[in-house]
Each structure stands twice: as C-alpha cells, then as structure tokens.
Amino acid sequence: MDSTLPLPWPGDDIGPIVLTEEQIQQRIAELGANISRDYAGKDLLVIGVLKGVFVFIADLLRAMTIPVTVDFLAISRYGPTEQTHGVVNLTKDLDEPLTGRHVLFIEDIIETGFTTHFIMRTLRLRQPESLNVCLLLNRITRRRIIDIEPAYVGFEIPDYYVVGYGLDSKERYRNLPYIAKFEPNKR
Amino acid sequence: MTENGKSPSDIVFAHPSEEEFARILDFYQVPWEYEPTTFELRWDEEGNVLEAFSPDFYLPGQDLYIELTTMEQRLITKKHRKLRRLRELYPDINIKLLNRSDFKQMMFKYGLDDHESLIGQQAGSKGPEKPPDDK
C-alpha cells in the first residue's frame, strides 16, 4: 500500500496537530521499555477500556519486551438521554481473573477523573497483586475533580479537546495517526 | 447519591446546572452532599455574621468542595473574592471553582448539546442563574 496517499482529513473540524505520529511513537517506545523493565518477571495483565484506548494499547503492547496478557472492558457513558442517565455499569466485563496478578490499567485521557476512578475502584475489588495506571494524555484542566496518580504518563497537554489516535468526536477521527486539536466551531 | 441516600430529584437545586452535575456524580457513583456547610467570612464588631459562603457540593471521598457557577466571567469577581477570603480563613479546605466555560466543556464531552438551557441566558437577560449575592 502506498503510504504517501493523502489522508481523507483534515476535516473541517480538525485544528492544529498537537502530537505528531513520530512524537507519539517515540514516547510509546520509551513507555514500553520502562514498563518492560518495571514488570520483568511478573505476571502482567494490561487492561484497557474501550474504545478510545485501542490504538494506544496496540502500539504499547508491541513496544513491550516481556510476556503480557491483555484484556478489555467497556462501560456505559453518561449522555443526554434518560437511557444514559442512572448509574455507570460494565457493558463488557473482563475475561481474565485479576486476583494475585499485576495489573496495568491503560487510559487514553483523563478529564474529570470520574471514569478512571470508577474503573480503578472496580478493578481493586478484584484483589490484584498490584494496580497502576498508564496514561497517554494528561490533560491539564481545571475540571479534574478526582486526582489520579498514573505510574506512567505519555504526554501532558493543555486543556484542548483532542481527537485522533483512538480519540473521537462522536465516533469520528479515531483513525487519525496523530493527535489534533478538535475545533468544531472553526467553520 | 448523597450519603443519606438522597438523589438529585429529592433536592431543590438553585440552578439546573447543579442538578445536572449531581446526576453526573450519581452516574459515576461519586458520593456528594449539596450545600452541607456554610462558612462564615465576615463579622461585625458584635460577632454577627455579615457574609458567608456555602459551596454547592461536598465530595466526602475526595474531601473536596465544589462551587459551580455559570455566570459570565466578568460577573464573578465577587465570587472570586469570597473564595479568596474562604481560603484565607480556612486554609485546610479544598475547594474548586467550576466556571461557565468548565461546565460547557463538561456538557460538550457528555454530548449534551443543549447545554445552553442548563447554563442559562447571557448576562443582562433573564436567565436562571442565581443572583451573585446569594451566598
């Protein structure tokens, strides 16, 4: 396949690139090396929550040089309709047991901290040997309500709404190879 | 849900944005209390309270107070002054101010495109925003 073919973007909503494909891949190589060093000889289970993290987790796993197991979960999201109110729940549970294992929860971006807090609490109840967070984007925002302390952080970014590299706006732009500012009112 | 089991529908909120925020906290199972504490800020010579401040929410799990305001930035000077005074008098209190822009961003994230109805009208028109001197 010709990699020089133009991408079908940027669309009208895509602003400046915040992190290039090269920057992302370089940092992921560093994260993979650090994680491989820290978890050498341990039974490592990497967990991601669908969907935003699937691109990051695929690249991160391939940057690791130790045996690793991966699993995914999915949760309901708060939304505009009565059906999306109520209480968060797992819409896809893990297949792997956690008891006694070293778990690394992979997160794409944290804003309020609500989602990560809920998932960490859920995972902790299953009694892993250890539980840490690896975060791709630490968004510096005043809206952080619940503090999360990731063991690994890819990048710190300003308080931008970003898309690409798995991150979406209404399910679009996940397959951008870079991370860009989302500017819905640009037009 | 509050620690005594109340849900957003059991509480009369001063503003629709507060009710929506309470629903979000409930959704993510973050315990909250609505205006549980009034902090005295100024007194007259006889010790009578002249000014006080009741943050909108308290999250006991985070030991964090949250004040939510949807007033336009230029109108929240008085609220900022109260917050500064609160921090001077009660330095151990953790409090966070979420302003109009923060709330709009949160609503956008949750797909609540009709968030203007939660925020209210622009300043100068009749809107549901609490008067700035309410606490």
Image (cartoon, coloured by chain):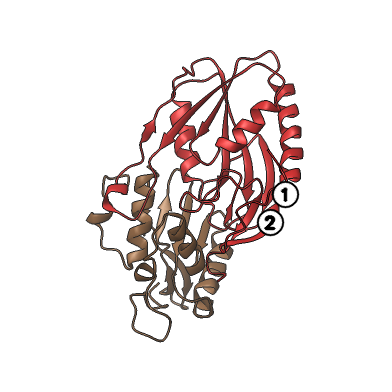
Task: Say above or below: A42 vs B29.
Answer: above
Taking the spot 39% from the left edge, 30% from the top edge, the residue there is: A92
> Is B85 left or right of A126, judged from the image as shown?
right
Residue most extreme to the bottom: B124
Q: Which chain is red?
A: A
Q: Secondary structure at mark 1?
A: loop
Q: Amino acid at mark 2?
A: Ile
Residue picked out by circle 2 = A17
As rendered, which of A111 and A182 lies closer to the eye? A182
Disc 2: CA contacts within 10 A as few (<14), some (14-19) or many (>=20):
some
Taking the spot 53% from the left edge, 42% from the top edge, the residue there is: A52
The color chain B is rendered in: brown
As rendered, which of B31 and A144 lies closer to the eye? A144
Residue most extreme to the front: A1
Residue most extreme to the left: B10
Q: Position of residue A114 (x, y in %)?
A: 46, 45
Q: Position of residue A144 (x, y in %)?
A: 54, 52
Residue picked out by circle 1 = A20
Q: Amino acid at mark 1?
A: Thr
Task: Say above or below: A88 vs A48.
Answer: below
As rendered, which of B105 and B60 lies closer to the eye? B105
Disc 1: CA contacts within 10 A as few (<14), some (14-19) or many (>=20):
some
| Labelled pair 2, 1 in contact (Cβ < 8 Å) | yes
Where on the picture, by quarter, is residue B53? bottom left
Taking the spot 40% from the left edge, 72% from the top edge, the residue there is: B135
Task: Say above or below: B114 vs A121.
Answer: below
> Is B55 left or right of B1, judged from the image as shown?
right
Q: Secondary structure at mark 2?
A: strand
